[in-house]
Image (cartoon, coloured by chain):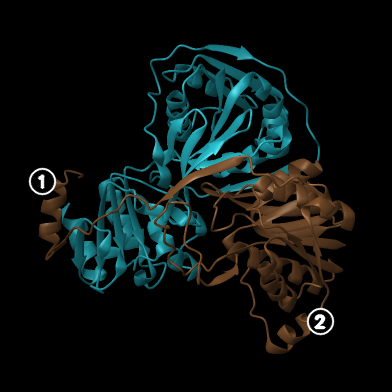
Amino acid sequence: MAILVIAEHDNATVKGATLNTVTAAAKIGGDIHVLVAGAGCGAAAQAAAQIAGVAKVIAVDDAAYANQLPENMSKLIAGLAANYSHVLAPATANGKNFLPRVAALLDVEQISEIQEVVSADTFKRPVYAGNAIATVQSSDKVKVITVRPTGFDAAAATGGSAAVENAGAAGDTGVAKFVGEELAKSDRPELTAAKIVVSGGRGMQNGDNFKLLYALADKLGAGVGASRAAVDAGFVPNDMQVGQTGKVVAPGLYIAVGISGAIQHLAGMKDSKVIVAINKDEEAPIFQVADYGLVADLFAAVPELTGKL
Amino acid sequence: MKVLVAIKRVVDYNVKVRVKADQTGVDLANVKMAMNPFCEIAVEEAVRLKEKGVVSEIVVVTVGKKDAQEQLRTALALGADRAILVETEVEAQPLAIAKALKAIADKEGAKLVITGKQAIDGDNNQTGQMLAALMGASQGTFASKVEVAGDSVKVTREIDGGLQTVDLKLPAIVTTDLRLNEPRYASLPNIMKAKKKPLDTVTPADLGVDFTPRTKTLKVEPPADRKAGIKVKTVDELVDKLKNEAKVI
């Protein structure tokens, strides 16, 4: 049986999380087909065909999928699923939105946010904010799975030469309408894709002080995140939140500035390769997970660090 | 309009859970339990809609053991009108819960269902979406703003990199994200009043739902340990370590 991977894309390009999901599919084993459903998504379908290890791309180009609304996406995917042993999507805001709906239409449980493939029916996934790792086995006929991108290496974006097959749309349910989108504009890398992440916490004192972190991040080519405490205090918007209730990141280098290290924050970053903590409180729990800790006033240390890089 | 709010009893979010030595799960003995934080936000949103006159009745429901009555009483104290416990000793999985919720939503004729985006124990983030699929209804997940107007609801959603707004025909399912609202605390008089509000108990069999788990948990382990590293004394030392030891910059 083959595996269907649902691509995360913006019609023009395929998003990085798709590459990690393809790797998860390869670990399960079987032919990998990628579904690119969108409107005017020809370029994204071509890009998906280049991904190493992909056997076939199914392109569904229809106005009903312009914004990949879950009502329409789930109907389409559930219709295709009968031919597959597994249906995988990245555990992004988008994948988490439509995939449980697919599972319900197929009358199967979904396995959320796997970080390891043990066998074709057994997977490891974090529960309790990553404070425990559960090994779960599915008895359902079709395994419907979201994949935590940080758990798997990215497949090579080029080197493949899959055939692109066009497939028909499954219709518009008409119950939901896209109104608009407000995307934060930034030249910095997206948090979940960044190789280096600089995050600030309550110790930043206000939103304006985050400019210290932006300066450091720009020197490093890093993304900028925040703890829930900083978001709750209104310093920065919620889409910057790293943690159990925000984004989960695992960059090569994570620099936590003025972050105490609440359980909820650690859950979102403790798989980073190298963690640096800068905090004036030497008792802060963040130092218990940091590879390099600097007990210092961030308002002096951060500009100094920026200057010395 | 009647609104159904689905909540869950979970380990309090401040508790650091520990895995049991026999790897069968996490140790829940003598651990503080509470309403799932996202579900508190769901209750609060329903109460605000009632205060605005959009909603006429709030029915709060949970699936779980008898002691989940405690969280239903909390929801009643916060402003829900009546409560339903779907009582089961089985650890219910999302699809089964969604089926139970559908049976109740149908029976109650609820046009709007509000629930948390995920429970902080299983971290599944599935039930609302599954319920929407089973009802053939629209869904507004990860909501940061909810505006009901006539027979539709406009939902602003937290997505990767920003916000998305969708217009949903009722019936609709909304799942809450952190920024939707700040839940109130229950006042003592309201806690007292909540004790007199109706709380019904039904069984999965009453609803015609099979709760047999489809996904089996083979074992639960603590995550790989991360050891504390070293403290550096100066920024210069930090830069040196990052360049020459960790080689990450």
Which mark, residue B196?
A: 2
Q: In this view, does A119 lie to the left or right of A201?
A: right
Whether residue A132 is situated above or below residue B62 in the rendered picture: above
Relative image position of residue A127 (x, y in whole percent) = 49, 52
Q: Is residue B118 left or right of residue B21?
A: right
Q: Which chain is tinted brown?
A: B
- Which quarter of the figure is the C terminus of chain B placed in? top left
- Which quarter of the figure is the N terminus of chain B placed in? bottom right
Q: Quadrant of residue A258?
A: bottom left
**Residue B199 in view:** yes
Circle 2: is it few (<14), some (14-19), or many (20+) Cα within 10 Å? few
Relative image position of residue A76 (x, y in whole percent) = 70, 27
Residue corresponding to mark 1: B244
Question: Helix, strand, or loop for circle 1?
Answer: helix
Viewer-closest of B14 and A34:
B14
Relative image position of residue A35 (x, y in whole percent) = 59, 24
